Image (tube, rainbow, N blue to C red):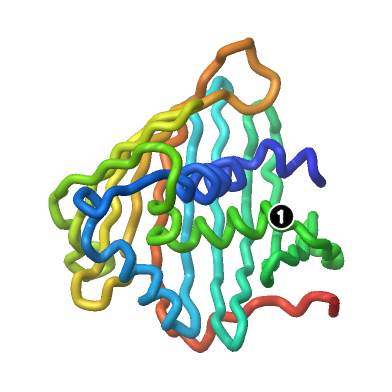
Amino acid sequence: MKQVKHVSLGCVLALTLAGGLGSRSVSAATAPAPLAKVSMALAGLTSYQVDYSVRSTQNPPSIEKDVYVVLHHGSRRIDRVAAMHPSGVGDTTVIEDVISGSRDCERYPVTAPFSCSQNPSLSASITGAVDPGRGLSGKGVSVHFHAAAAKMVAGVKCTGYAFTLHTPTEHGSGVLYVSPSVNFPCEEDATLVGPAIGPTTAGATQTLISTWTWRRFNDPKLKVPAVPAS
């Protein structure tokens, strides 16, 4: 189970966003004005969904598609179902995590019972990943923004904020699209270059090409599975 997570692109990029971008400095002069408002807008929702897809240029390539369901009912709970096809592995692996605070309940395969434990690092990475306002702010490594063209996402004209980033081990760029009327994130497209994952030659790198899409805001049909009591 833990070995599967080590090659998960979703965990890699979520940790990058929460542990990397989330620790980068963004000056008030360069940050997009609505960025801080995005977190406030998402926190005011009862529920929303985030769809995530990523592919790696490693040879052989790896791909992953995740679905996150976020509920705010007194406390926040996140259900993440990740379908991953790691580099060099023939079968697609499906894993599910239910996050509440720092508690992670996971099952693999998804027909198995949930097993729960305290996992602050994974919880923080997933929590940061579903909130670009949190993921693209903080202190540490450089992130710079500049204006980008607007984009229609699901019938909504969303304002574009292009960004570039650098860390000691990786660099990349992307565009965050935000709905200007309500400050909800629409989409984030990013390309990230960093160390290759798994058995590779020393110094090998990979490029991760990802898309995040936020939708189903305040949808009462969104549910998070029941997990064992604490």
Report the front residue among 8 and 184: 184
Counting from the top left corner in percent of width and height, residue 155 is at 22, 70
Counting from the top left corner in percent of width and height, residue 212 is at 41, 55
Q: Is residue 161 above or below residue 201?
A: below
**196 horizontally vs 148: left or right:** right
Report the front residue among 111 and 97: 97
Residue visible at 30% across and 37% down in the picture: 164
Counting from the top left corner in percent of width and height, residue 151 is at 18, 57
Counting from the top left corner in percent of width and height, residue 103 is at 75, 66
Q: Is residue 41 above or below residue 117?
A: below
Report the front residue among 118 and 3: 118
Q: Residues within 10 Å of mark 1 (few under 14, many from 20)?
A: many
Q: Secondary structure at mark 1?
A: strand
Q: Is residue 177 above or below residue 197?
A: below
Report the front residue among 226 and 183: 183
Residue visible at 50% across and 25% down in the picture: 206
- The residue carrying mark 1 is 95
Q: Is residue 214 above or below residue 135?
A: below
Residue visible at 36% across and 76% down in the picture: 41
Using the rendered view, name the quadrant where residue 196 is placed.
Answer: top right
Using the rendered view, name the quadrant where residue 7 is placed.
Answer: top right
Residue visible at 79% across and 75% down in the picture: 227
Could you tell me the amino acid type at mark 1?
Ile
Using the rendered view, name the quadrant where residue 126 is placed.
Answer: bottom right
